[in-house]
Amino acid sequence: MSQESLHGKWDISSSDEEDCPPVRKNFQSSKCSNVPITSKREFSKNNAEKSLANQGIPLCVKNERDSSANMMTNYRMEERPKEQFPTNTQTIQSSWNSEENNIVASVKQNICKSEPSWQRSPSVKRKNEQTDSGWCLSSSDEESAEDKDDFDSCFRAFHETNSFRFYLTKVTGLQNEHNCSALHIKDILSPLFGTLKSSVQVRNFFTDQIVTLKCHLRSKPLLIVHGEKRESKARLHEEAHPYENIRLCQAKLDIAFGTHHTKMMLLLYEEGFRVVIHTANLIKADWHQKTQGIWMSPLYPKLPEGSCETSGESNTNFKHDLIEYLSSYGSPTLNEWTNIIKEYDLSETRVYLIASTPGRFQGAQKENWGLLKFRKLLREYAKPIPGAESWPIIGQFSSIGSMGADKTKWLTSEFQHSLVTLGKDVKSTTNHECPLHLVYPTVENVRTSLEGYPAGGSLPYSIQTAQKQLWLHSYFHSWSADITGRTHAMPHIKTYMRVSPDFKELAWFLVTSANLSKAAWGAMEKNNTQLMIRSYELGVLFLPSTFKTPFLGAKSTSLSFPVPFDLPPQKYTSKDKPWIWNIPYTSAPDTNGNIWVPS
């Protein structure tokens, strides 16, 4: 039963997003011609080739149904004899929450009207699909001014009603209805959201970023915060050298095996200031055919002159936590931006920031970061739920670290113990009573994806790690996102949530850069008195208590949260195997007619 209140409930719906690995430099590729694809819609061969609420009231769910970017550079794609894949001609249908649909239905009908790819003539399909790998506002780079106006109108209609400000990235090759409420990096940096003066791009993986950003930002001052070292750092400096407007800031990584994994934009406009926290690396492939997540802040206005530094804080302490995170880099260049942030009013922020930064933390400091910060927020701001022990925790991610010899070493002790917390007055549920569902793509998910096997390059679960924790695989559930049209767009998004037993309500939802690893979330040391974190991570937590206003124009008080994949998740069958990126797959060709032979 849904719990009702003056502010209603949050329905679970879905949003759309996906992830795609960068083009590998050292491989040989051969394809089988005219290989049909197992799918809920038909993919053309050319398209395949491009693949490289009131306080305490849970969100209600409407359910219809990184180093991760560091790709393997040595593998070869080998030719296989032509094989016929079974083809399902059923098309993927969009499942919008009825309230949202009432608001934007007429706009979608008139604007999102491009005919689906399978209804186009072959010549039109080739023309639209043989474009640059994904750096476009739609599936075709030959976008007309009318198409751009259509995007503006369609997105504005959705954006104005999106209380959560949570989006998926556009996926090349999908029907427009699945991309209408999605964003591309071009959209984020477009004048649609403000007249840009200067910006910060916080990233962990760069290949073609300078060329990309110079096209969008022109001569505007740009600071790139990165974690590159040695040769890759030298290449980045060489690439940035010709551009006087670009400055670089290296994130310190003093603890072994740590990564700079945060993905964030700080955008300073003539009209105000904005923060964008997301899951996509700054490479073309990550914005092409993968499922990715974006949280975009409101446009923050400047505070009145003479305001104190603590002015403009939100009920979620977002401003303080953002400044604290940026200060953790210890960079004078980033400190310039913390001073800028202090001048703006961030009081309209409704999400909580959960960050990780490398270090060993004791005392009160250890609750400022990672898993213990997550636990603290759930303890202080989440509300108790009767029968919470039956509310599953769902974790969805694109990479997996070493969990230990059995589940008690970290997963069901430190990790699950933190995530089951709900309020101050209720003792934490014993871990074994709370179901835990982990969503990670199967080999078949990857094989039949838009990108085919190369999509697995962004899912770096190694055989060395997997063999040491076979017990973990009993928690696995396959990737399925029919509700957003992204079942075949492999996820690079990372999400965690607490959902009701009927999968129709959410107690909380987190989108983050953090995968399922101790390096990202932290692990306890010294008899649980010290938290050790190796990597930089960043995400935002949605709690119902901060969303007291339903969607504008909704006919009811029901709120709908856009969960990006299908609920309930489906447990692995006896035939399903988790994708492991450094072993060969030769028994069946992928979408492109290739097999996977890492070397």
Image (cartoon, rainbow, N blue to C red):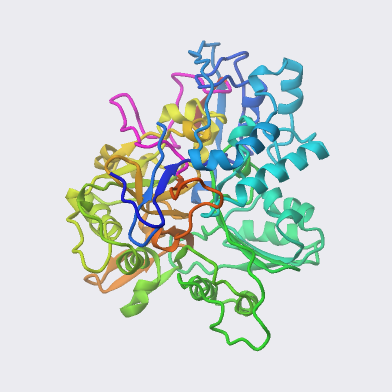
Q: Residue at x 45, y 44 (%)?
A: 563
Q: Residue at x 49, y 33 (%)?
A: 95
Question: In the image, is residue 560 part of the stretch drawn in magenta?
Answer: no
Q: Position of residue 82 (x, y in %)?
A: 55, 11
Question: In the image, is residue 589 part of the stretch drawn in magenta?
Answer: yes
Q: Along the line of sight, which residue is nearer the eye, 255 or 63?
A: 63
Q: Is residue 475 left or right of residue 292?
A: left
Q: Position of residue 153 (x, y in %)?
A: 71, 44
Q: Position of residue 66 (x, y in %)?
A: 49, 51
Say which quadrant the N terminus sits in. Answer: top left
Magenta residues, start to end: 563-592
Q: Residue at x 73, y 36 (%)?
A: 132
Residue 574 in view in this figure: yes
| Vertical order, 431 against 48 (above or below) | below
| Vertical order, 483 against 313 (above or below) | above
What is the count of numbered marks?
Answer: 0
Residue 73 in view in this figure: no
Secondary structure mostly seen in the magenta stretch: loop
Q: Along the line of sight, which residue is nearer the eye, 409 or 511?
A: 511
Q: Residue at x 45, y 26 (%)?
A: 585
Rendered image quadrant of residue 233? bottom right
